[in-house]
Amino acid sequence: MALWPRRGVARAPMSARDRRQRVILTAEGLRLPLTLASRGTRAAALMIDLTMIVTTIIVTTALIVLFARAIDADKVKNGTGANDLIEALAVFWIIAVFLARSTWFLWFELGSRGATPGKRLTGIRIAARPTRDGAATRLTAEAVIARNLLRDIELFMPLIFIGGAMNAGSDTTLAGWASLVWFGIFAGFPFFNRDGLRCGDVIAGTWVVEAPRRKLDTALSLGQGAQGISTLTGAHYRFSEAELAIYGEYELQVLERVLRDNRPDALTEVAQAICHKIGWSSGAGDERAFLDAYYTQLRARLESGMRFGKRKADKFAGNAGG
Amino acid sequence: MSSSAAGRLGGTVVGWFSRREDAAIAAAEQASLRSDRFRLEREADWRRLEAMLVRIESGRIGAISDDDLVALPALYRMLVSSLSVARDTTLDAATLGYLEGLAQRAWFVVYGPELGFRGWLRRFFGGGWSASVRAIGPDILIALAMMITGAGVGWLLVAGNPDWFYALMPAQPGDVRVPGASRAALYASLFGKSHETGLAVFAAYLFSNNAQVSILCYAMGFAFGVPAILLLIHNTALLGALLWLYHGQGLTLELVGWLSVHGTTELFAIMLAGASGLHIGRSMAFPGGHAVLDAAAEAGRRTATVMTGVVLMLIVAGLLEGFARQLINATAPRLALGGFMLGWWLLYFFAYRGLAGRR
């Protein structure tokens, strides 16, 4: 059977989105299309996560300080019970900061959504890269751990570089430049490979893909409009074979989008274009019924062609019917 | 009696199906396109699967009835076949997009991580950790050689010219551990009780710091392992310099005892982290028959288990350093504890074959 056609290839130079399309082959032999997340989306997700981490740390710190104030930390003498409590608070703080920094990503990406809060908000998730022949592989806990251990040199090291230099009061600009170059190498890494992998993805065998959550739209061929009968005027639209043979699948899907959006000016425009093309005189006011009828009959024609293995990609393609 | 029960069950099943089918057929009759009828007949199952996915994705697996859980694989397969039929028969982009999105989500759930967190933990301690350590054996030997070299270099450098000591160990105000220090001062530094208060804080700080260093050591493997080697050598050169300093005052054994309490665990962990980094670097530099990316991914996953263990070992080391070393104030018990820890790790990693053999 023919592959699912990639319209963008034939029509125009590949768009940025088409370039991010990948297909994996599941164990059931299903070809599952995936869209790699764009680098901008991933950067946004990271920013959201970092903001959340910093907020968590600040809130934890503030709570601990407030609590310490409440038990009047300064006046507590060594060796008393309250002193032990202060000590416990300090331990808790160190552990909390370590956990926030090191396990935030780990914890969320190990969940069934495979995404941190930032990734969820931007609609992306992590997945295992397929093998070289395209067979899909499982995401493992080890892979998630590996990809997040690498985050340290990609993100936190430059900060430590600058912070260390400023603390020591030494040549901050040199350290700044060094960390900038260092950071540049890792931040730039996704730009030097086709799949937008960062170092952690390379090591773990993962990639980041879009996780669309689409609602099922209503079926369009329901009701009277689809049967060609206008509920408004009672007119009966029926198109001849020749009038339907002009358009292909691409135009059908443009029409579908227009019908689902249901914007009056777009409906009028498209209805006039079709009328012009098939040589009908376009009336006004009954565009929706006209387009419903044309859509249903065009789709019926193209789908019956499909069942016999004849497809017509767009209006420039040869006639599928003949 | 059994036949009547079967009859009742049969009746329920038939009623259940026919009710659903009736509704579907009624809806499908409305549609004038064959592909839309196909869709309407199956829509209820798709939506049932979608509702389950939503609950699983939000972590509420408990909210799913047993019937649904049993039906999940079947619903997934049904969806897969719906999608392949739809691709060949329908031109409804919305339905195709929905089905593809749903199939993707279902695939991630059905083929998600094969065991839960608890199962993973059991496998980790029950042999997975040991096996992954054994798998990078050659790299551990290289890392060990690097560390011994580093200590040797540190010793020789400082022995040749004591000024090197300051280069290796940046002077901190009040630190008595400098060349030319008296025996008494050095002895006091080993058996003093400087951290008696705040031991827990000290331990937590040490852990956090060491964990960061070891993760760095591992991550450096990505640059073909060279920085990992440098990090290993630098850290142990410091150790060599310290050994030289205490050796000069005849306190070698006392220093070794002082170090061994936590050092056998901590240095072991750092060695494993360095070895993991080397393993990644090595498999990227010499991928053999694999593509570089595949080789890197395989090495990365193998060493991730080791690294999880390294972090755990560093927690143990932090506790030993923060508490045990300050509380045990004599060389012999310190050596005994350090030796015991070393023996324990060696046995656990190289002698323990885990549950894998029994299964």
Image (cartoon, rainbow, N blue to C red):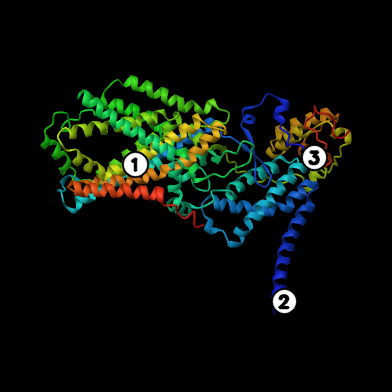
Q: Residues within 10 Å of mark 2 (few under 14, many from 20)?
A: few
- The residue tagged 3 is A299
Q: Is residue B78 visible?
A: yes
In percent of the image, x 50 and y 31: which residue is there? Answer: B284
Locate residue A57, reporting x and y percent. 35, 41
In percent of the image, x 58 and y 46: which residue is there? Answer: B108
Residue B278 picture quarter: top left
Question: Horizontal placement of A215 versus A115: left or right?
Answer: right
| Residue at disc 2, secondary structure | helix
Going by the numbered disc 1, the residue's amino acid type is: Phe
Going by the numbered disc 2, the residue's amino acid type is: Ser
- The residue tagged 2 is B3
Disc 1 or disc 2, which is closer to the eye? 1
Q: Is residue A61 visible?
A: no
Residue B18 picture quarter: bottom right
Question: Horizontal placement of B220 versus B244: left or right?
Answer: right
Locate residue A275, reporting x and y percent. 82, 30
Up-down: is B353 above or below A47? below
In this view of the protein, which residue sits in the foreground, A42 or B259? B259
Whichever of callouts 1 and 2 sits on the residue coming sooner in the sequence is: 2
C-alpha distance separating marks 3 and 1? 69 Å
| Residue at disc 3, secondary structure | helix
- The residue tagged 1 is B268
